[in-house]
Amino acid sequence: MMPLHKAREAADATRLPLMVHPQAAWCDSLDDILAVMGRGDVLTHLYHPMECGIFDDQGNVRTSVRDAAERGVMFDVGHGQGSFDWAMADSGLAQRLLPHVISSDLHFHNVHGPVYDLVGVASKFLHLGLSLDDVIARVTRAPADVLGMGDRIGTLAPGAFGDAVVLEERAGAFSMEDAFGTVRTVERRLEPIVVVKGGRIYRDHC
């Protein structure tokens, strides 16, 4: 736990949030990690099925997770190459543990699958039952607020950076895979149509 306590000290000294990647961690339980976290901190990889997860031995959301959410700890999807499981997400959402932030954790090893892009991850949460408004907020305004940049990104307010993506919601039958090879067919998918960066269109088709 020493690295986590050192990170806590650094976060407090710089007045920045602490973000923790918990699975297969260096302690007995997620309870130990969450005890060090407070308002504005972020626990990522919310729906992974490995050790130090959000569920107890009976499959219920841990009391420590509920307590952390009540005191303002934020929960992030962080899909990644090994951190998103359809069944875990089903169970968490059924128990009303929603992510504050939907993120891709995109990197070299998952850009060709199963993640591909943030829009695809967002589409998975449409399939899981979140509304379009909720999904969009969790990939724009919510992460901007977590970073303390809500007046500059994740918004189209005057004076902001002027970044935007125009999305089209498409209906059909689309195969989408979690990080463990389970494939589901979803009926709605978001597709980027126009990308704007700094107020300038730099790609007009995707």
Image (tube, rainbow, N blue to C red):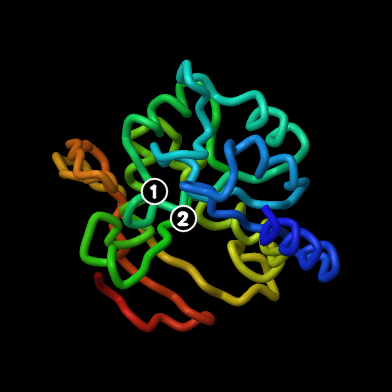
Label 2 crowding class (10 Å Cα cut-off): few <14, some 14-19, many 20+? many
Question: Which quadrant holds residue 151?
Answer: bottom right
Judging by the rendered image, the residue that carries numbered circle 2 is 103
Q: Taking 162 as reference, is 103 above or below it?
A: above
Name the N-terminal-most of marks 2 and 1.
Answer: 1
From the viewer's perspective, is 135 left or right of 114? Answer: right
Question: Which quadrant holds residue 88?
Answer: top left
From the viewer's perspective, is 100 left or right of 1? Answer: left
Question: Of circles 2 and 1, which is in front?
Answer: 1
Q: Quadrant of the C terminus?
A: bottom left
* Residue closest to the eye, 199 or 41: 41
Q: Taking 71 as reference, is 168 above or below it?
A: below
Q: Position of residue 84 (x, y in %)?
A: 37, 44
* Residue closest to the eye, 131 or 116: 116
Question: Which quadrant holds residue 105?
Answer: bottom left
Farthest residue to the right: give it: 13
Q: Hey, what amino acid is under mark 1?
A: Ser
The reply to whether the C-beta atoms of the residues labelled 2 and 1 are less than 8 Å apart is: no
Determine the residue positioned at 63% across, 61% down. Answer: 144
From the viewer's perspective, is 108 left or right of 51? Answer: left
Q: Position of residue 203 (x, y in %)?
A: 32, 79
- In the picture, the disc for residue 148 is none
Res 137 visible = no
Q: Position of residue 9 (x, y in %)?
A: 81, 63
Q: Secondary structure at mark 2?
A: loop
- In the picture, the disc for residue 83 is 1
Determine the residue positioned at 54% across, 41% down. Answer: 99
Farthest residue to the top: give it: 58
Q: Exactly how many numbered labels are in the figure?
A: 2
Label 1 crowding class (10 Å Cα cut-off): few <14, some 14-19, many 20+? many
Q: Position of residue 106 (x, y in %)?
A: 38, 65
